[in-house]
Image (tube, coloured by chain):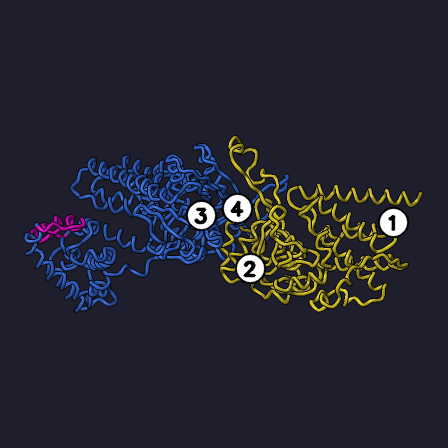
Chain colours: A blue, B yellow
Amino acid sequence: MADCGEPDGPGNKDDITRSKNEGKELTKEEKQRLRKQKKHQKKQKERKNEKGPSETEKDKTPVSLLPPPQPVATQKAPSALPAPASAPIPVPASAPFHSSPAPSPADKPAKSKAELKAERRARQETDRAAKQPGSSSSGIKTKVPLSELNPVVKRLPEHVQVDDPAVVKRLAKKLERQQTLPYGASNKIPLRSDYGYKVSLFSHLHQYSRKAPLTQLLSIPSTVIHPSIVRLGLQYSQGIVAGSNARSVALLHAFKQVIRDYTTPPNEELSRDLVNKLKPYISFLNQCRPLSASMGNAIKYIKKEISNIPSQCKEEEAKTKLLTCIDRYIEEKIVLAAKAISKYAIEKISDGDVILVYGYSSLVNNILCEAFEKSRKFRVIVVDSRPRLEGREALRRLVQRGISCTYVLISALSYILPEVSKVFLGAHALLANGYVMSRVGTSQIALVARTYNVPVLVCCETYKFCERVQTDSFVSNELDDPDDLMVTRKGKTQLENWQDVSSLGLLNLVYDVTPPDFVDLVITDLGMIPCTSVPVVLRVKNLDQ
Amino acid sequence: MPGADKETDLTERIEAFLADLKRGGSGTGPLRGSGEMARETTYLLRRITAQARWSSAGDLMEIIRNEGRRMTAAQPSETTVGNMVRRVLKIIREEYARSRGSSEETEQQESLHKLLTAGELSEETFREHFVHLKANVIEAINELLTELDGTTDNIAMQALEHIHSNEVIMTVGRSRTVEAFLKDAARKRKFHVIVAECAPFCQGHEMATGLSKVGIETTVIADAAIFAVMSRVNKVIIGTQTVLANGGLRAVNGTHSVALAARHHSTPLIICAPMFKLSPQFPNEEDTFHKFVSPHEVLPFTAGEILSKVNVHCPVFDYVPPELITLFISNIGGNAPSYIYRLMSELYHPEDHKL
């Protein structure tokens, strides 16, 4: 089934064109076929744009030879028309070859005849596509130029569109649909509702309360969502697992458990079905707490690995392959990256240094502990901020190792900064325009450090680099539980009844973005780069993949 | 003897005031506002003038100077006390000069011309006795008291000149002056206020509840979010503990970060401070500039064992250099920070700068 929309070859095609020209109503099957064609063409366009310049070679081979395995399989089953023997057989065999990055040259001569046939069909398809009004003809015609650039217009994530009621309704419907039970009645993923008065500047973001976890809305037994995912979601929403590395690693371990417990249902392919099974889990986790950039990259990697499983692979083999892939990802991108970063960072720490750190970054803590073990003499100042007070955890770990520490709150920054010789900061994500997205307060520290001429070094693994761009902390952020800002001093809680006062709002931001001119150096596992080189690293990574 | 009773009564009051100063300042943040402090000091000084035994202006000045030194030693961070003492000393000088008949103007200015031509003139001993000096001085102190009572209202009256509608204003911690300022503007204009809570004392919470009660749209943010939200702020209006002689500020901790963030976004920084906060101190005196309170505000005793291995700092004040400040709004109007030295020469006599 090379050209997925035309299982019968030229014959049926002519039927459709004839019926169109005659103005007759298309039969149900023909309508189905048309729909499949359109979907297929759209998928081709998206695929092509994603694969970018590495695909220029493959673009020479016709578009229809690169069907992603998904539409091939889904369209195989419903269309019951018999397929010609010769053409489809070499093509599906070549499809899995094509989806792996480097097509082996040995296959090329064997495909030449099928290639030519497919080319002819593709040309006919494009001709028809051109006749169809407003279809994806532009996508197929302009092959090479578009594939050079990444698509500029991406779909806006829904978690920054809370103020648009249409988007919220769409999300609710999507969550309802994501129940893969055959007898799925009331087991759907619940939609979490906002809590409290939201500051008008942030009405486009969600604001949840920690006291109302998502799991209260789930029915028991919840057979849609795997229990380890439910547990993970609860840990995220209550803040038990926090910090971008910890969340990614927990997510990957939970996915490993899911894969271990997975069995392919009959008549389904593991590569497609597993990805579909993961979708509701990801929606659930997103509802518990919005996904971080590192988690997003990890999920992309897993989905790619799953879809790259060849269809004739046995289930056990496929599962072990996936498990080793995940282990390798964790090992390479997180553990070994941390070692590489420590190696570079330790060069930057000299004896007698006074190092300032903010909050709790697992990477920065790692660096300091390793430097201390290599007997560098330095002392650390830990800066902390309300309401999370994560710095206390960092303080505990550093003091346990025997490093001499000082502890202040962020309001005492101007007092303590004249003593400091270097500032080490962790990052949640590095954006493509060089901005550093990190815990709220990081930009303030970088600003004051720059005023006192203290160098600011950001440590970040490459798997946290993301392609988004952002210039301020408003357009995309996370709002934490506003009740955390309340404090009881001397037995009196000032803001106890803040909900009753209509003009009072509490704002508990989680992230902020630091402009690149405040950051002097970024230490990654690929080396030490300036902040503005992030898009270069992203491009190199994309080419590798 | 009635005289002796009056004296013991006076010394008792002074001692009580000193004890109050010592206790009040070492607690968690100022328990009393500076305005109240200034008023109390002035009442006490008026009482000293009325009840103490003195014959000439010089004696009175000596007495007040001694008491002033003791008061500032009791609580060095409470600068309004010292400021009021200096104001009263200046009043005494003026009244003395007026009683002598010479005009005030020539006495005041220490111009270069005067230094060259006058020579050894300025050795006033203030030894002459004038009958009505006491009454005059007490009357002048009463005028000072009325001025003190009206400072907050005077500043609040200027609010509409500085706030337009639909503005976003940021403020830090709690200042009664700024609260009155914003409430006055809220009567006629609609605007939004963002209050930074100012850990560890979290006085911003009180400010926010006060503002929201009169219907001002208020948002409370954590200190860490100051830079993050600064890009949407139109003005930063803050109060201060002291205005220093160079135009800089000694304000609650965290103000320097706010000032830097405002400068980065080119947001004007406006200080609402009444004139009695202006102090002839300079910020270079390192040991006396910073004041620390108990670190258990920052790291409570429940943190456990690590407390013994960690240094914890809890400074109360921050220095803000005058380059970061756009405008001072005081009860006598708006001034640029570069004009502060002139105002100081009008309020205090140079010889009184060091008590």
**Dot 1: element:** loop
Q: On the image, numbered disc 3 is attached to which residue? A: A439
Amino acid type at mark 3: Arg
Q: Position of residue A178 (x, y in %)?
A: 33, 46
Q: Which is more foreground, mark 2 or mark 1?
A: 1
Same chain for the residues under marks 2 and 3 in the image: no
Give the residue type at disc 2: Leu
The mark found on residue A416 in the picture is 4
Task: From the image, tell me which residue sits under label 1.
Answer: B53
Q: Are marks 3 and 4 on the same chain?
A: yes
Q: Is residue A65 left or right of residue B150?
A: left
Q: Distance of mark 3 from mark 1, alpha carbons?
A: 64 Å
Residue hosting label 2: B324
| Callout 4–callout 2 Cβ contact below 8 Å | no
- Give residue A254's quadrant in the image: top left
- Does the magenta portion include A93? yes
Tell me if I can see residue A217 in this picture: no
Task: Say if mark 2 contacts mark 1, CB within 8 Å.
Answer: no
Residue at the extreme top: B305
Q: CA distance from mark 2 to mark 3?
A: 26 Å
**In terms of sequence position, does the residue under pointer 2 or pointer 1 come before the other?**
1
Q: Which residues are magenta?
A: A81-105
For the point 28% across and 35% down, the residue is: A261
Residue A338 placement (x, y as % from top left): 33, 41
